Image: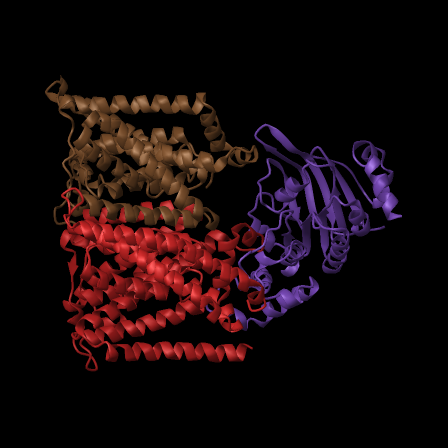
């Protein structure tokens, strides 16, 4: 069993590596390339976040602190390289970031990991606020409003790599992203990774089998800080500028969204989340001012209807797939898709109409308003029935699926 | 002396405003175990609703209408959102309110735009109440304090004299028992959530025109309110009250103090070389440090006494 | 039975242990000596403080005064994980497992510390053969081999109780505390549980809280009776049966009923 599993896993990782290599050849435009780079950074960041939330059960609202601090330290390190005060190749700068993240998460984690749950969430938020507020105070280090500017070509040309062209930066990110992914996956398969799951499930019982839950949380948080730091350093190299926004609440919130939308229950969930959210952010923000709203709504919908995120939607269908009954789900899914689509168009219509002219100024186009409203009403009405139909099919299938789960 | 008295009055009014927010948050947390991340968003909604209804009906009706409207929004949120998420546990609930804060801010963008709205102190209250030495004290701040204290007293009366207040109070200390006694807990939850939101809305009505009504106001106040709740001890109303006043004064006083450690050291006769590495750090004034102080206090509290000032639960 | 004699070393010694919550005194000066290798049952009416005493011994609550030692070393008010590492393991009256881990993983997590893997994040857990074998052995012992991949939270109640015991004994601790292992079980489940307990505690020191007198007299070498936070008697099952104080305070009618079913 485990042989086949190992083979399948190797194949999967090989496929991932191949994808990293291939992607820029397919999406070679400047815009796509910078988006791919950003996705790589965010994949590391979101995965590192899931070491906390998904694996250890720590809901942090301040994970960007480690990302941001590492980014700043890296920016200064690169600037030191530029003036010749430091001799470190740019390719290894993510290590500087990683160590910075590790350093700060060791210190702050010591204070914050004593209690899980809501207190941890609040404390992480408070610390994030404290660091963000300090960033505006210590302008020498954080560069105030303008941030710290750096130059990724500071290391000169080594083996033909100058990090001038974006494609070189992409491959640097790809390599680090791949390595980080493998490492973070490996950690889930170690004694620590397993005990982190145990502490997440039942910290008290973990104590009675010899483990100190606080210590487990602290180590996991430190490791998460390390990987967040790698992501932060890559961000500095990628953008060549870093501002206090990178360690602010919005950035911390963003990674929560990514991990959760992708799904915190599976290792690969946050990867999906990071890719999707990054894509939505740049794609949607080109089309509409309301993209953040769509985003928030998507998040709420997922919490309300699929708290396991997108990856969970996939895994709950695996038994149906194995049993070969996916076909029977399709009609009700089609129904739901159709009615959901109609409702969605209506909602989008209303939101966009609101944005076109503020509500109280008055938008004179009456017909779009009525059309959108009707679509929401009709679509919503049938959507409810469609959801009921989907539930019905699942209930009918459940005895058959029980054997396959 | 003059500076001290005026600043003290200002911190009192600000502290009471904070308590209006933190009391609702505390009640909701004690009752339902949910830390309402969107609490400050309801504060923001209060300000915007007051602005909007004020345009139609004037300030005084808005003072009553806006909190009620916010309460209704809160009730809907509880009934159709939180209650559904409840089965998935506290983390999901927390994340739900987090997402809600996001959405409310965006909806405010959508309806009222990104710039501040012109929500003003009503003419009838826009005068100087008294002049202390040379500083004028605005009547609106006094009015704010009056409303806050009125709210404080009515909250006290509702909690101690009414049936639902008894249930709420009992659940502060014995949440399981209340459930076991067979009260319609879901409805009480909705009531408490709506009530807490309405309190936040009232704070928004009062604070929105004194400070500024803009889409960023929720995030600005939200994290301070969390600090208050952590400092006071999660789930303790008395703690929230003390911490509100404490944070209120710290913020008000520190903003007003233009002193730095450097000044202190010079006062003590110590000289520091301006080229020294320490010079930059020491010359930071207290007013520059003001935004950090509450959080610093919170972190210190967590190290020294993790359950907060008056907290009994370890969380 | 000769086990109560002083020749054997003491596994667990409680001297004048007291515990009060606020003004309420739960444990009023308990003195108890558990001899290494014996099976000792702690009985007493509801509210006598049996579970509290377990919580004090295992470090879940701090004691108000008094001292507890394990194999001669002081464990009073030490943290649960520290006490566990010294070789004391316990189960819970209310099932306390890792609900989202598989049954196998529950057991493997329970042996990791004892095997010295601590917080290691450099080794693959699947490559740790001793941990795997240890978990497999326990799995076989508690009879859940065919449930190994199931999430612990999805097991039946009796299976969860078995897993609860499995987690407790997996690490090989030589002093085992079982808190009402048969609570809420049917007759046949209880019989299976008794067999399981006898099997898994072979060669270990067992201290057990139990309400089911059938189980107690079946398993225990010695019995202590706890009433209102005090040990009123300690002795072999026969001595306890004959003890006047015990009969007055607690056993009385109940014992006769149970004995009827026993003999």
The residue nearer to you, when weighing A176 against B177, is: B177
The vertical placement of A218 against A152, above or below, is above
Looking at this view, is A287 or C124 the one in front? Answer: A287
Taking the image as shown, residue A402 lies to the left or right of residue B272, namely: right
| Chain C representation colour | purple
Q: Residue at x 29, y 41 (%)?
A: B41
Closest to the observer: A218 or A60? Answer: A60
Name which residue lies at 32% across and 47% down.
B100
Chain letter, brown? B
In this rendering, would B194 be left or right of C103? left
Residue at 83% across / 45% down in the picture? C236
* Residue B141 x %, y %: 20, 25
The residue most toward the right is C263
Residue B255 on image: x %, y %: 19, 35
Decide if residue A89 is in sight here: no
| Position of A307 relative to B26 (above/below) | below
Q: Residue at x 40, y 67 (%)?
A: A268
Could you tell me if residue C211 is visible in this image?
yes
Which chain, by letter, is red?
A
Location of residue B240 by image quarter: top left
């Amino acid at each position: 069993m485990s042989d086949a599993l190992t083979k399948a896993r190797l194949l999967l990782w090989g496929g991932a590596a191949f994808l990293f290599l291939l992607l820029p050849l397919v999406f070679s435009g400047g815009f796509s390339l910078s988006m791919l780079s950003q996705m790589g950074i965010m994949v590391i960041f979101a995965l590192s976040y899931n070491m906390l939330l998904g694996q250890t059960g720590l809901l942090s609202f301040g994970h960007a602190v480690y990302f941001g601090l590492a980014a700043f330290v890296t920016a200064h390190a690169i600037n030191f390289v530029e003036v010749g005060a430091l001799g470190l190749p740019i390719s290894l700068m993510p290590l500087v970031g990683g160590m910075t993240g590790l350093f700060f998460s060791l210190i702050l984690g010591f204070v914050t990991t004593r209690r899980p749950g809501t207190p941890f969430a609040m404390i992480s938020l408070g610390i994030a606020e404290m660091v963000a507020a300090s960033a505006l105070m210590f302008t020498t280090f954080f560069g105030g409003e303008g941030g710290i500017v750096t130059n990724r070509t500071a290391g000169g040309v080594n083996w033909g790599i100058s990090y001038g062209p974006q494609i070189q930066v992409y491959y640097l990110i790809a390599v680090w992203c791949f390595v980080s992914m493998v490492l973070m996956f490996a950690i889930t398969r170690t004694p620590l990774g397993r005990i982190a799951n145990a502490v997440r499930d039942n910290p008290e019982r973990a104590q009675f089998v010899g483990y100190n839950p606080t210590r487990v949380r602290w180590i996991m948080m430190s490791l998460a800080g390390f990987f967040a730091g790698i992501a932060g350093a890559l961000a500095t190299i990628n953008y060549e500028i870093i501002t206090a926004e990178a360690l602010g609440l919005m950035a911390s919130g963003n990674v929560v969204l990514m991990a959760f939308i992708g799904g915190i229950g599976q290792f690969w969930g946050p990867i999906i989340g990071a890719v999707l959210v990054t894509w939505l952010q740049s794609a949607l923000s080109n089309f509409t001012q309301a993209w953040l709203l769509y985003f928030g709504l998507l998040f709420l919908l997922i919490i309300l209807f699929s708290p396991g995120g997108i990856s969970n939607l996939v895994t709950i269908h695996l038994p149906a797939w194995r049993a070969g009954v996916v076909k029977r789900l399709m009609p009700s899914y089609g129904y739901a898709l159709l009615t959901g689509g109609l409702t969605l168009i209506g909602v989008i219509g209303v939101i966009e109409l609101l944005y076109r002219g503020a509500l109280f100024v008055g938008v004179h186009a009456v017909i779009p308003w009525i059309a959108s409203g009707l679509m929401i009403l009709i679509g919503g009405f049938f959507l409810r029935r469609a959801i009921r139909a989907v539930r019905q099919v699942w209930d009918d299938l459940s005895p058959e699926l029980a054997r396959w789960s | 002396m003059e500076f001290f008295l005026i600043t003290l009055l200002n911190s009192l009014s600000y502290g009471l405003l904070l308590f209006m927010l933190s009391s609702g948050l505390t009640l909701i947390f004690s009752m339902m175990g949910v830390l309402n991340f969107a609490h400050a968003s309801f504060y923001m909604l209060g300000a915007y609703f007051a602005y909007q209804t004020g345009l139609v009906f004037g300030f005084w009706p808005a003072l009553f209408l806006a909190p009620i409207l916010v309460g209704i929004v809160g009730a809907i949120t509880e009934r159709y959102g939180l209650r559904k998420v409840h089965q998935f546990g506290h983390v999901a609930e927390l994340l739900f309110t987090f997402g809600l804060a996001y959405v409310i801010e965006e909806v405010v963008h959508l309806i009222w735009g990104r710039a501040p709205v012109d929500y003003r102190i009503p003419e009838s209250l826009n005068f100087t109440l008294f002049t202390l030495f040379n500083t004028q004290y605005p009547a609106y701040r006094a009015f704010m304090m009056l409303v806050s204290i009125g709210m404080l007293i009515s909250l006290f009366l509702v909690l101690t004299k009414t049936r639902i207040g008894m249930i709420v109070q009992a659940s502060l200390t014995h949440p399981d028992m209340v459930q076991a006694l067979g009260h319609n807990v879901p409805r009480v939850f909705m009531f408490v959530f709506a009530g807490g939101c309405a309190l936040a809305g009232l704070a928004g009505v009062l604070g929105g025109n004194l400070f500024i009504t803009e889409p960023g106001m929720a995030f600005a106040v939200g994290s301070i309110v969390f600090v208050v709740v952590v400092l006071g001890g999660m789930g303790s109303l008395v703690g929230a009250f003390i911490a509100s006043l404490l944070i209120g004064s710290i913020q008000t006083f520190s903003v007003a103090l233009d002193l730095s450690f450097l000044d202190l050291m010079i006062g003590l006769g110590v000289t520091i070389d301006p080229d020294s590495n320490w010079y930059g750090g020491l010359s930071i004034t207290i007013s520059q440090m003001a935004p950090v102080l509450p959080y610093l206090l919170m972190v210190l509290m967590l190290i020294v006494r993790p359950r907060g000032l008056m907290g009994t639960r370890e969380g | 039975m000769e086990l109560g004699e002083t020749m054997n070393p003491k596994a667990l010694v409680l001297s004048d242990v007291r515990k009060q919550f606020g003004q309420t005194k739960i444990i009023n000066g308990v003195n108890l000596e558990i001899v290494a290798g014996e099976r000792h049952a702690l009985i007493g009416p509801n509210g006598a403080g049996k579970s509290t005493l377990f919580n004090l011994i295992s470090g879940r609550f701090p004691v108000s005064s008094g001292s507890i030692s394990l194999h001669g070393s002081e464990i009073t008010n030490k943290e649960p994980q520290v006490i566990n590492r010294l070789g004391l393991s316990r189960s819970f009256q209310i099932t306390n497992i890792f609900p989202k881990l598989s049954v196998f993983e529950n057991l493997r997590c329970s042996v990791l510390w004892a095997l010295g893997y601590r917080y290691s994040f450099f080794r693959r857990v699947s490559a740790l053969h001793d941990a795997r074998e240890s978990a497999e052995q326990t799995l076989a012992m508690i009879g859940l081999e065919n449930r190994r991949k199931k999430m612990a939270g999805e097991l039946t109640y009796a299976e969860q109780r078995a897993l609860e015991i499995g987690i407790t004994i997996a690490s090989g601790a030589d002093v085992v505390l079982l808190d009402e292992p048969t609570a809420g079980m049917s007759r046949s489940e209880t019989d299976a549980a008794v067999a399981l307990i006898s099997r898994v505690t072979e060669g270990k020191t067992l201290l057990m809280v139990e309400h089911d007198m059938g189980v107690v007299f079946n398993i225990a070498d010695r019995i202590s009776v706890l009433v209102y936070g005090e040990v009123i008697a300690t002795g072999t099952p026969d001595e306890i049966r004959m003890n006047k104080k015990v009969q007055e305070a607690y056993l009385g009618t109940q014992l006769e009923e149970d004995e009827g079913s026993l003999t």
